[in-house]
Image (cartoon, rainbow, N blue to C red):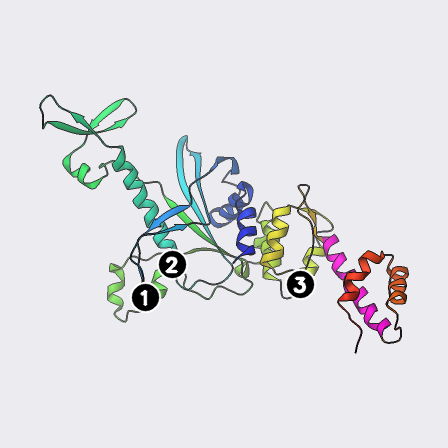
Amino acid sequence: MGTLDTEAKKFLGKKEAFADAFNFLLYGGEPILNPNNLHEMDTSQITVPYGNDAHLPVQKYRDLLRIWEAMTDGKAIYVILGAEIQGNVHYAMPVKNGLYDWIGYSNQVEEARKSFKKKKGLHKNESELYAEDGIIKIKLTSDEFLSGFRKNDRLIPIITAVIYVGADPWDGPRSLFDMIDLSDKRLFPFINDYKLNIISAADMTEEDFRKFQTDLGLAMQIIKHQKDIADKIIEETNHRIIDTDAAFFIKEAAKLDLEFERKETGVDMCVALEKRYKEKEVLTAIDIYREYITSDEDIIQKIIEKFDVTKEYVLPLLDQKPKAK
């Protein structure tokens, strides 16, 4: 995805936007997930090789990965939240995300195994295997040690979201079952499914856009309507200052022909839109003047007078409209 991938990660990687996306997915927009309770995690994953040319494990990187720490009924809960950003439909997405999740669980089991220690006994070949819970040393059974996991150990749940920023509806599989070719339906109960959690602009209603607390709602609305009323939606922001990273994300995802600077104070997308309208008017005027004025200097002077602009503004636009030969 190139630039889109970069801008999407900049914006959606912000705690507020990341929390907003998952509050929409998990709680219908209710602000349950507090951005301050999100902590970054290493996005690298070691994957098992597969495919005709695969011989070595390959290191893959998740787009975004956070651990959420929260309190529920007075108890601390931890959930790992991953996000995969898609500008296009990926027709093997259930396998891709499922692999990420299972590697995540496998890594947790491996970390548990690494925490086991061997306590030396008095005699040469005598030892005990144990795990440390705080200052308490708990002897492991041989089954627990072979498993790399204790009977009462528990995994941290992993939830992966696909944040799809295409304008067209997601027409790919939404679960592993959608990818499986099996005529004998009696076998399905014995096959484990994997369901995608898709946040898709194309699937949202106008009411859905209002459920977001950040500029992610505006971004999704413009992405959905990029082919028809994107300009109207921007005009309706009424010069509201948009988060800079959100503005650049919107520009790339919705393929907007807008120019603005990356400022810490934010972006007024209406100003960028007005600049584009004005530039279009100037280019149209140049076309008209070229029909009966041969001198570029005369055309420049007329444009300056009509649109109250500088010569430096006109010259690059004049180059876009060369004289007819």
Residue 105 lies left or right of residue 67; in this view the side is left
Task: Tell me the chief SS of the magenta region.
Answer: helix
Provide residue 77's location: percent of width, then percent of height. 39, 36
* The disc label shown at residue 94, or none: 2
Residue corresponding to mark 3: 229
Q: Quadrant of residue 106?
A: top left
Provide residue 95's location: percent of width, then percent of height. 36, 58
Residues packed near mark 3 inside 10 Å, few (<14), some (14 to 19) or many (20 plus): few
Residue 105 or 53: which is nearer the viewer? Answer: 53
- In the image, which residues are magenta? 270-290
Provide residue 166's location: percent of width, then percent of height. 54, 61
| Element on which disc 1 rests | loop
Residue corresponding to mark 1: 180
Residue 314 or 141: which is nearer the viewer? Answer: 314
| Element on which disc 2 rests | helix
Q: Quadrant of residue 174?
A: bottom left
Residue 101 lies left or right of residue 238; in this view the side is left
Marks 2 and 3, the one that precedes in the sequence: 2
* Residue at 48% across, 63% down: 170
Q: CA distance from mark 3 to mark 1?
A: 38 Å
Whether residue 208 is visible to the viewer of this picture, yes or no, is yes
Q: CA distance from mark 1 to mark 2?
A: 11 Å
The mark lying in front, picked from 2 and 3, is 2
Whether residue 153 is visible to the viewer of this picture, yes or no, is no
Membership of 158 in magenta stretch: no
